[in-house]
Image (cartoon, rainbow, N blue to C red):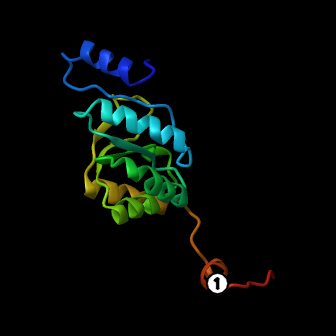
Amino acid sequence: SVSGAEALTEKLDELSHKDLVLIDTAGVHARDGSAHAALAAICSAVPAMIGMLVLPASAQTAVVEETLSRLGRLAPACAVLTRIDEAAAFGGTLAALIRTQLPVALVSDGPRIPEDLRPARADELVAAAIEAGRDFDDQPDEDLLARRFGGLLNVAA
């Protein structure tokens, strides 16, 4: 654990013999501007670092979209999609990533990092999203579709 850009560069010097060093920052809320500044300072202190945005597949689509919008300013190179095994559905997350053109580099379907990380494959992600959708037995009915797409005012029955 390190605090600040200077301590980070010192620690990275100690680990320079390693092939890969994963740096996990404390969870940052998409609306926390001061945390964004701290992350930007870390990114500028280590120019060789490849920034990855870690997103849980189990997050609501709107949360993922807001995170991509706000943290996208840090220009991550790619995304890591975690908690695939916990997601009831994650097609919305994939759609948000596609809209922002942020590639998914790694996925995880288990709690052990880095052991459960593996390279992302588009065909496997789409198949997993379809399968998760099938397993989720809440199919839209006419009432749900009318409430979502039927206009501004809906009358409760």
Query: Dot 1 corresponds to which residue?
Result: 146
- Mark 1 is on which residue type? Ala
Residue at point 36%, 66% (across, down): 99
Residue 123 appears at what percent x and percent y?
Answer: 26, 58
Residue at point 40%, 41% (across, down): 109
Name the quadrant containing residue 3.
top left
Identify which residue, 57 or 36, lies in the foreground: 36
Location of residue 106 with respect to 135 vertically, above or below: above
Numbered marks: total: 1
Location of residue 18 with respect to 36 vertically, above or below: above
Give the farthest residue toward the right: 157
Label 1 neighbour load within 10 Å: few <14, some 14-19, many 20+: few
Residue 24 appears in the picture as rendered: yes
Residue 27 appears at what percent x and percent y?
Answer: 51, 36
Name the quadrant containing residue 40.
top left
Residue 10 appears at what percent x and percent y?
Answer: 31, 15
Query: Quadrant of the image for the C terminus?
Result: bottom right
- Secondary element type, mark 1: helix
Residue at point 31%, 21% (across, down): 9
Residue 130 appears in the picture as rendered: no
Give the farthest residue toward the top: 14
Q: 31 left or right of 50?
A: right
Query: Quadrant of the image for the N terminus?
Result: top left
Residue at point 47%, 42% (across, down): 36
Residue 87 appears at what percent x and percent y?
Answer: 50, 50
Q: 87 left or right of 97?
A: right
Identify which residue, 49 or 56, lies in the foreground: 49
